Image (cartoon, rainbow, N blue to C red):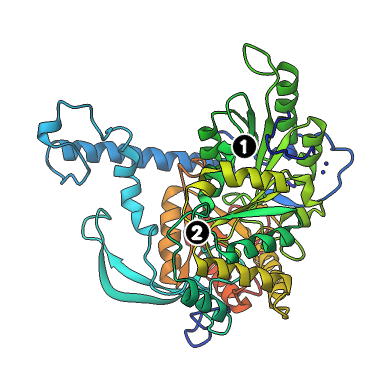
Amino acid sequence: MARTTTPVQNVHLKVQLNGNNVKSASYKQNGYQNARQKNGCANGAGPLSTQRLFQRPESFEQAPMYVAVMTYLGFGIVTLFGYFRDFLRAVGLEKCHIAKERDEQMDFVPLYQDFENFYTRNLYMRVRDNWNRPICSLPGPVFDVMERVSPDYNWTFRLTGKTIDNVINMGSYNYLGFAENNVDFLKTVAQQAQHYGLGVCSTRQEVGNLGIHKELEELVATFLGVESSVVLGMGFATNSMNIPALVSKGCLILSDELNHTSLILGARLSGATIRVFKHNNMQSLERLLRDAVCNGQPRTHRPWKKIMIMVEGIYSMEGSVVRLPDIVALKKKYKAYLYLDEAHSIGAVGPTGRGVTELFDLDPSEVDVLMGTFTKSFGAAGGYIAGKKELVEYLRSHSHSAVYATAMSPPVTEQIHRAMKCIMGLDGTTIGQARVHQLAENTRYFRCRLQEMGFIIYGNDDSPVIPLLLYMPGKVVAFSRAMLKRKVGVVVVGFPATPITEARARFCISAAHTKEMLDKVLFDLNEHRGSWFQAYGVTPPNTTSLN
């Protein structure tokens, strides 16, 4: 049965934070063209259940019981075969490729734990050809994949010198199609590379602070509607290196259970106490907030120095959208701070691409710390932190990423600058807004067709991240290989990146995808659905138009 969710103001953050059949001729290859409680809001509407402000449908349909049973059985079988293969290696009947200590190191504490390596050795290696596929073209709506073969069951690979041309790219985060090499669009990027070179070779606090960096920061602040921003050279480090500057020992972080690894790492490095609430479950979050305010720190019961809620705009594995209005209301009620990671949502959602704050028509000042990356919608690299001017100036001198990391590359800076100006219409065109609207149209079309075909998909109707549930480990492998044979490049994800019973393929929609591209992918999915058995949904299949 499908479940739907519905989403619901913050003391400002001071510097000290001291408060609580695609034809090759048809397309241009380059350029634009844990037992978790699923979707907790269904089990508890949260503090504003009687006064919903926004209705954003999300689907987390559950598969039939036999699917879960068969999935566990599949993992059980491959585990038994893994132990059998380990036995064959131990007695010398099978060659051992695994890393191990030299004979003279046998008395040392082992570097390689045999049991910890069991999954990689016996399961992952057998299907490793489905990941790390080398491409040899621009990662636009279509790309070329380098063909490779393995003589030893994926322990090593050899390139054949051939390529698989014009594979439809359904895996890159190229949401607005700015990962392009159109000469007319990239003139200014080439000019900046010619003027400044490719690298700065210094931190911004030394001799790496360029004028184009300041211009970009002003543009980002204007785009987001906040006072100030700081741009950083690496998206992952934007989280992992800035969170420790905001919270420390004696502070409390309330983190969504599906938060990205960069948020988790930053939280751990900070030394703050971390408590996890169920995904998008407002009852779970409010329970933790109430307990934190009432009981304070463990043992001493002193008040927490700060309480910070950390969430994402769009969750990259589930395709779900944060219930931002509800969280803002809770943040105000309990005098907590809010850290919002918009890596996948900035540029990709909202009427003009300004992220989930615009999607829910909220004032950006309601969020204390706005974080985002330029690696997805902007086709570049790096990230930003935005908010109050005092917050940004504090981070400039206290964040490891701002103080010690090399400044952003000039051509990358210009790529972000020109993409953002395009979205805002400051380049004198409507191309940017056309791409934002095309992305929304492609997203809804692809989601709707998958549901009509009877597939189980997760996430929000507005999310360009579309997980298609495959469940069984054998089906995940067969799906990825079969789609590549049909010139469709997909990303498949399984345990331990997902719960053991929820392996999936993850489609990332782009404004650069044409309807013909999407229809070909849908046709291939529908044509081979019976052999993959991945359509488990209760929605009756309706595939007349595809046939």
In front here: 434 or 9? 9
Say the numbered circle drawn on residue 208: 2
CA gap, disc 2 and disc 1: 24 Å
Image height of 457 relative to 65, above or below:
below
Question: Of the residues shown, which amino acid type is indicated by label 2?
Answer: Gly
In front here: 135 or 296? 296
In front here: 45 or 373? 373
Assess disc 1: are there few (<14), some (14-19) or many (≥20) residues with their C-alpha within 10 Å of its C-alpha.
many
Any part of residue 457 in sight: no
- Point out the frontmost of discs 2 and 1: 2
Marked residue nearer the N-terminal end (2 or 1): 2
Helix, strand or loop at label 2? It is loop
* Left or right for 77, reference 8: left
Residue 382, by quadrant, is bottom right
- Residue 434: x %, y % from top left: 71, 75
Say the numbered circle drawn on residue 285: none
